[in-house]
Image (tube, grey):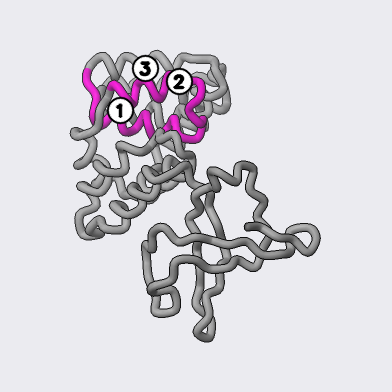
Amino acid sequence: NPRTTGGLTGQTDFHIKTVLRSDEVVRGKKSIVLPRYLPINDKDKPPHYLLFCDVDKGKLDPYRGVVLRGAESIDYLKKALALDVKQPVKNLEYFFRFLEHEDPEVSRDAFFEFAKANDADIALAAPKFDPVKLRNWIKDPKTQPQRLGVYALLLGASGKEDDALFLRSLLDSKEDRYVNAADGLLAGYMQQKPREGWIFLQEVIRDEKKPLLLRLAVLRTMR
């Protein structure tokens, strides 16, 4: 029931389906009124929102809403919040399943967990990851370029001989998306082929004719 007083000012009824983190001020409520006009394209199928709120002087203060695809995304969030922070390796196994989820908010959240994880935990969790999925994600032109280096690192930690050759072939690619991810590709390759990786690394550093972006990526990998 969105109603406007002009522009985005107005009110919208927000029906509460699930409370992820409760507070006395919201306990038992079935709906609240948002102090903002949120137009609904399909009134028969209103969108699912993840609503973030503060509590200020005993009143609920909604400050951010994230559109979700549906109930499956809510289930992901429930289980994520229930994970034991003292078991980071096990948690990464959970988040891996959602790295390329159809809901971009779920996918983004799962990827962030890997971005902030330390290398030791990733190395321990990697044997549980599916290398076939990782290879497909790396090859898929729809995969976000900024994720390729992380996926290559994970493939290097979980893959086999063929995966090492696959990563090595991408290091020779002229595609911008792979050139920009060269540090992750090299790090993944070196996990499978340490000796060959170090030889390749030194060759690139010595060869002034190699592309500057590739040589900079090699320096990042060394660091």
Label 3 close to label 2 by CB (< 8 Å): no
Q: Which corner quadrant of the image does residue 158 belong to? A: top left
Residue plotted at (43% across, 17% down): 170
Q: Magenta stretch: dominant SS?
A: helix
Residue at 44% over, 34% down:
102
**Alpha-carbon span between mark 2 and mark 1:** 15 Å
Q: Is residue 204 above or below residue 123?
A: above
The quarter holding residue 64 reads bottom right
Q: Is 222 included in the stretch rendered in magenta?
A: no
Does residue 90 lie above or below 28 as drawn?
Answer: above
Tell me the SS state at disc 1.
Answer: helix
Q: Quadrant of residue 6?
A: bottom right
Return the residue at label 1: 155
Q: Which residue is mark 3?
A: 168
Q: What residue occupies the far front of the structure in this picture?
A: 44
Relative to 33, 37 lies left or right: right
Q: Nearer the viewer, residue 83 or 4?
A: 4
Residue found at the very far right of the displayed protein: 6
Magenta range: 132-160
Do tag 1 and tag 3 residues touch (Cβ < 8 Å)?
A: no
Tell me if 201 is positioned left or right of 51 in this view. left
81, above or below 149, in the image: below
